[in-house]
Image: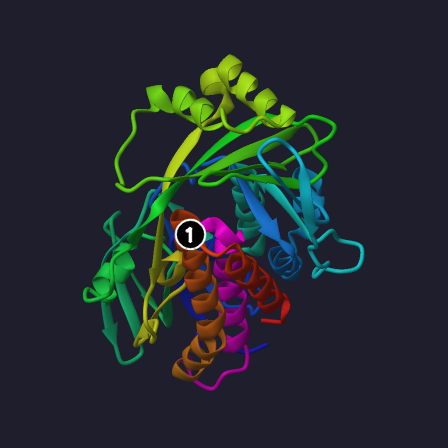
Amino acid sequence: MTSPANNILIIGGGFSGMSAAIQLRKLGVAVEVAEIDPGWRSYGAGISLGGATLRAFKTLGILDQFLEHGAAADGVDLLLPHGQHLATLPTPRLAGDDVPGGGAIMRPVLAKILADATIASGAKVRLGCTFTSLRQHADGVEVSFTDGTVGNYDLVIGADGLYSKVRETLMPEAPKPRYSGQCVWRAVLPRPAEVERAMMWVGPKIKTGVNPVSRDRMYLFVTEDRADNVQIDPARFTDMLTDLLVPFAAPLMQQCRAQLQQMGADAQIVYRPLEALLIPQPWHRGRVVLIGDTVHATTPHMASGACIGIEDAIVLADELDGADTIEQALAGFEARRWERCRMVVENSSRLGEIEIAGGDKAEHSRIMHATHMALAAPI
């Protein structure tokens, strides 16, 4: 394996950044990860994952760890608020005939799996540290860090998320994240025996669901329309979330409601306004390239935000492997990623618009089906 970049800095130690470190180390290049959080923490409850994500895990080499610590199953059950079963959406087995087509895991657990793999890869990880300046020159990028050190790199990868400092530095003219008009609530609850796979109850204006994240836990999610992007006092989380579940008479939903009232803060309730971002290409300037949420943050309607960020890392490493120049590799990366990432961001946003407007359910179903089919294609 050869690469035109032999010394690479990744700014941001989230899912995309860690995946890039893991894949790039397979090329034998030197990799540093600069992560601003000294605890390298990942916040949040559960994260739902489709077959394309599990396929990416297999490429990274972490699929077995996911299957051990998360939960995987085939299909997604759709139900009405009172519990009547409507349909079971198929989830193709993209990671292999012996691997279920989807699943979920606690975000901190997945972050730990990726962090362990990053360290095991031999990448150098600098915690509590980020950049203060990027100065490009003919042979690379000189980076000054918050700890007072300076380094020179053949390539810098910005993977520092939706509110990326690298993006602001590199592309000050770029669009800003846009609030979608929806928010999502998540909580962690005990997993009843009857919850074997993802289940969703679809109401007129609110959608709720559960997904197993381990052998004994599941996460609850509720999507709510909210015109204004406002902060909410965490002290109100339990009451607000349980109120949203009142119209869902299905026994399991009412069981979840009772558990939330009993558990309170122990349910780890998370409230998140849904924002999206799609930066026009090119996603690089010289020898600095952006991946993941820095350039294509999506709402969770297709459960594919983490997927396309991790895929970015895999494709970037693939394009660097054997390329004659860094510019050639970055052009190849962007050409392979644009349509897939655009599709996920725009289709997810459209699903949210339909839900807010109470629009055409047939269009909603067509978009979901078409997106699932496209995600099944190789990257």
Q: Give the range drawn in magenta.
A: 300-326
Quadrant of res 205? top left
Inspect this view and state whether residue 292 appears: no
In the rendered view of the protein, which quadrant contains the C terminus? bottom right
| Residue position marked by numbered label 1 in the rendering | 352
At horizontal 63% and vertical 71% (from top left) the residue drawn is: 377
Q: Is residue 142 left or right of residue 90?
A: left
Q: Is residue 127 left or right of residue 97?
A: left
Coordinates of residue 154 in the picture (x, y in percent): 37, 72
Q: Is residue 131 left or right of residue 63?
A: left
Compared to 257, does 209 lie above or below?
Answer: below
Nearer to the camera, 15 or 132? 15
| Element type at mark 1 | helix
As drawn, the residue found furthest toward the bottom would be: 324
Coordinates of residue 295 in the picture (x, y in percent): 36, 63
**What amino acid is found at the position of numbered circle 1 in the picture?**
Gly
Coordinates of residue 222 in the picture (x, y in percent): 48, 36
At horizontal 59% and vertical 76% (from top left) the residue drawn is: 1
At horizontal 51% and vertical 39% (from top left) the residue drawn is: 203
Coordinates of residue 331 in the picture (x, y in percent): 41, 81
Taken as a whole, is the magenta stretch helix, strand or loop?
A: helix
Q: Is residue 44 left or right of residue 132?
A: right
Nearer to the camera, 108 or 370? 370
As drawn, the residue found furthest toward the left would be: 173
* Crowd class of label 1 (few under 14; some 14 to 19; many from 20; radius 10 Å): many
